[in-house]
Amino acid sequence: MTSEPEFRARTTRVATGSCVMVKLGQRGLWVLYEVIPATRPQLPDSAFFQVGAAVTCGRQRIPPRSNSINPMTHAFLQLNWLAVVGTAVIGFLLGWLWFSNILFAKPWMAEMHITEEKMKEAAQKGMAKFFVQGFIYTLLSTLALAVLVKAIGSPNCIKGAELGAFVGLLAVGTRLLNAGVWEQRSLKLQAITIGHEVVLFALQGAVLAVWR
């Protein structure tokens, strides 16, 4: 078993680390503390660092602690779920506005070859299931964006909007473009649907950046 002087000689050369050993009193207990790597605390002469090896102090062997939690998992566990649901509602309302007669309902219907009669038939059968499914999918995409915003970090609404627009255009938008090639969608229809995704994710990213 490694003696305390030998262990001290081997570890005092390490400048930073994830743990610090502090001795309480002349013959007291050696206590293992976790320290943040980005900081270097002022430590007494009796304290020293250890990295990547089990600690041997007197007759007690303390195994090293692992802090290798996945950043995405950590971000997921730190989410504000009220903010996620609230942002999903905002995104859902944006979709309602985007595909309403105020904005792009008529050109979207024309490009999709959906007539007024078809819309009335769908309304008679009930639109509730469409709204429920639409909100669930919006909630899931909002959850994914919230994890990214939390993991990457967005200090203000501008940075959050930039991140959201980046995801909406290059992650979601390009996949819609790829699908549109095979489905032979018109450029106007592509612009309407992809524009919605970019604006949606940009708006949600801005909200999630400030609603923590």
Image (cartoon, rainbow, N blue to C red):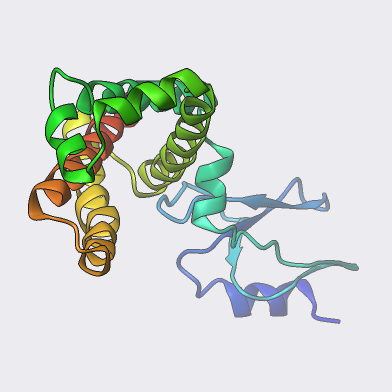
**Residue 34 place in picture, x, y as percent:** 62, 51
Q: Residue at x 25, y 48 (%)?
A: 168
Q: Residue at x 45, y 23 (%)?
A: 83
Q: Residue at x 29, y 54 (%)?
A: 172
**Residue 143 place in picture, x, y as percent:** 47, 39
Residue placed furthest toward the right: 59
**Residue 202 place in picture, x, y as percent:** 22, 37
Q: Quadrant of the C terminus?
A: top left
Residue placed furthest toward the left: 188
Image position of 76 with respect to 20: above or below: above
Q: Residue at x 29, y 35 (%)?
A: 205
Q: Nearer the viewer, residue 24 or 150?
A: 150
**Residue 121 place in picture, x, y as percent:** 41, 25
Q: Is residue 39 left or right of residue 103?
A: right
Q: Can you see residue 207?
A: no
Q: Quadrant of the N terminus?
A: bottom right
Residue placed furthest toward the front: 117
Q: Can you see residue 102?
A: yes
Q: Nearer the viewer, residue 68 or 81?
A: 81
